[in-house]
Image (cartoon, rainbow, N blue to C red):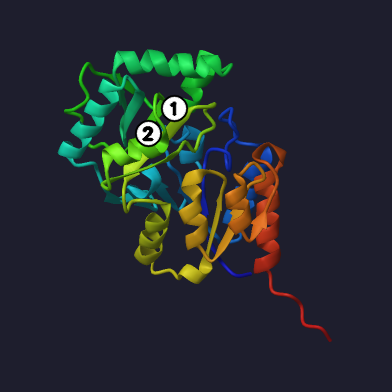
Amino acid sequence: MEKKIIFLDIDGTLMDFDGQLPESAKMALCQAKAEGHRLVLCTGRVKAQIYPELLKMNFDGIIASAGAYMECDGREIYRHVVEKDKLNRLVEYFENTQTTYMLQTKDGVFMTERSRKAMVRHFVDMGMAEEKIERVMVADVFLREKLCDCDGVEKMAYYDAPVSMEKIQEVLGDYFKVEGASYKSGEGSNGEITCAGENKATGIRRYVAYIGGDMKDTISIGDGPNDMEMLAETEVSIAMGNADSGLKTMADFVTDNVDQDGLWKAFQWIQEITTPKAPIV
């Protein structure tokens, strides 16, 4: 069997939108690991927001913060943080527009009390209990009156902005990249903000180069807007059944939804394409 480097998104791919890892997904991961494939988390979440049960599974690598943070075999090997003057401009804009937002670091997330209350209302209005909000948030939330002096910010998330994603991109400029939220968070202008040039695809290339691997041995599985570059970068790409239509169109294989054994079925397909066929006699 050909050994592959498999990059896995978390929300909507590994974990369902209740923050649960389907038993079939766990079985698929264990089987793939036993067969010698390298398994790498590749997520828009910062490391502090990765579910503890996933961290305990000893993945071969972690690409977090949509490429701005990377580990290999438990060792941190790359980290990119937002420049202070650019961060200050973003904070000022979101405060002036009264947008709900958070700053994400590898140690936790930073919010004002105003934003924390508004974020809880946002998810409660979606029908989410506060216990579930804590479950999917994962990380510690640090409250500060002013966020301009935060250190180590790798990316940001916002909710219920009064303007479009395109307008936010225009205001913030080319230093940042603004895209739709990877976690299903209702209607309206919700999104994630990363530094331009830091994405899952650059993280994948960096990881493969670090281990001395070959891009021809890469496979990615995802479902959200920030997975598009990842699926385009790897040799083989798989979209979940709950993925956006654009992601499905570009994928080599479309599996079922995350809560319909989608990951298990994706790995079954991987096994088919990596197992040498017996010669016809």
Please tell me which of labels 2 and 1 falls first in the chain: 2
Taking depth in this image into account, of 127 and 19 the one nearest to the observer is 127
Location of the C terminus by quadrant is bottom right
Spot occupied by residue 117 in the image (x, y as percentages of width and height): 39, 13
Name the element at disc 1: loop
User: Label 2 is placed on what type of residue?
Assistant: Ala
Residue at the spot 52% in from the left edge and 14% down from the top edge: 124
User: Label 1 is placed on what type of residue?
Assistant: Val
Within 10 Å of disc 1 (Cα), the crowding (few <14, some 14-19, many 20+) is some
Spot occupied by residue 9 in the image (x, y as percentages of width and height): 51, 46
Name the element at disc 2: helix
In which quadrant of the rendered view does residue 209 lie?
Answer: bottom left
The residue at which mark 2 appears reads as: 48
As measured in the structure, the alpha-carbon distance from the residue carrying label 2 to the one carrying label 1 is: 7 Å
Q: Disc 2 vs disc 1: Cβ atoms closer than 8 Å?
A: yes
Spot occupied by residue 133 in the image (x, y as percentages of width and height): 49, 20
Please determine whether, in this image, residue 155 is positioned above or below residue 96.
Answer: below
Query: Is 195 on the left-hand or right-hand side of 241?
Result: left
